[in-house]
Amino acid sequence: MKLTYINHSGFALETDAYSVLFDYFRDTKGKTGYVHDVILTRPEPLYVLSSHFHPDHFSREIFEWKNQKENITYLLSRDILKHKRAAEGEAVFLRKGELFEDAHLYVRAFGSTDVGVSFLLRAEGKTIFHAGDLNNWHWKDEATEREVRMAEGNFLHELKYLKESCPHLHVAMFPVDPRIGSDFARGAEQLVDHFQVDIFVPMHFWGRADEVASFGPYAEGRSVRFTLLANAGESIEV
């Protein structure tokens, strides 16, 4: 399998039989790039997943692609329907705990500590996790101690729920957001502490890749392959 960084929290996963696109809102070159030039031109089926309605994770542009490619399945968080960004019939809408499965792909929706869901996939014998906006959003430098405790408790609760189903993640795409402040990697640290993670791919870092790279030694100290795809269009083989 090939995993390509598209933008922000957007990734494309390609197998010989199908492709999966996560949290698309902009292509690698803006309105054009890897999605338009490669993913949408592949004859194999395409699954488009969006974790929530925020404009840096979802764009209605995805529905325009049906005009050029017929075999697209849209798997969207139910909050996208709730916030009227999409209509019934345009997609399969999932909430926490719900499952989609067909001949190619298994997708289960897990929780978030913001809005929407996170996604666990079973693809080609591997477990692939895309966190959406699931993170320890504690903002320690500006929040009260009580707010930090609540944020951490909510996050650890969601991790426990995920771990009960899947303690081993072959690939984890997870937010490492420097805007949080001095403790910005705490959620990522807790993920690799609680799970066996083979490959950790940071996302949602707002172009601040140099800062995110500082998490690498911590991950590698847990026998995790830390893979920072800093530039749109970069790929790895999974």
Image (tube, rainbow, N blue to C red):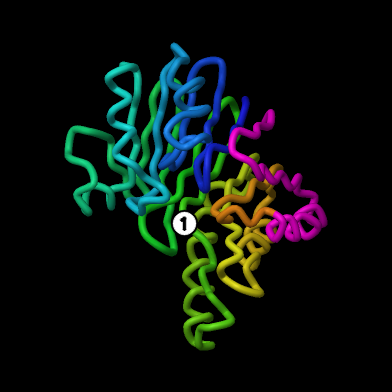
24 lies above or below 205: above
Image location (x, y in percent) of residue 99 = 37, 39
Check the picture and name the quadrant holding the N terminus: top right
Residue drawn 51% across the image and 69% down it: 137
Q: Is residue 216 magenta?
A: yes
Image location (x, y in percent) of residue 125 = 60, 28
Q: Is residue 141 magenta?
A: no
Classify 10 Å Cα crowding around label 1: few (below 14), some (14-19), many (20 and above).
many
Q: Which residues are magenta?
A: 210-238
Horizontal side of 59 relative to 118 (left or right) equals left
Residue designated by label 1 = 133
Residue drawn 47% across the image and 15% down it: 42
Residue 156 visible in the shown view: no
Q: Nearer the viewer, residue 142 or 122?
A: 142
Q: Nearer the viewer, residue 69 or 118?
A: 69
Residue drawn 67% across the image and 31% down it: 238
Q: How many marks?
A: 1
Secondary structure under the numbered disc 1 in the rendered image: loop
Q: Nearer the viewer, residue 93 or 213?
A: 213
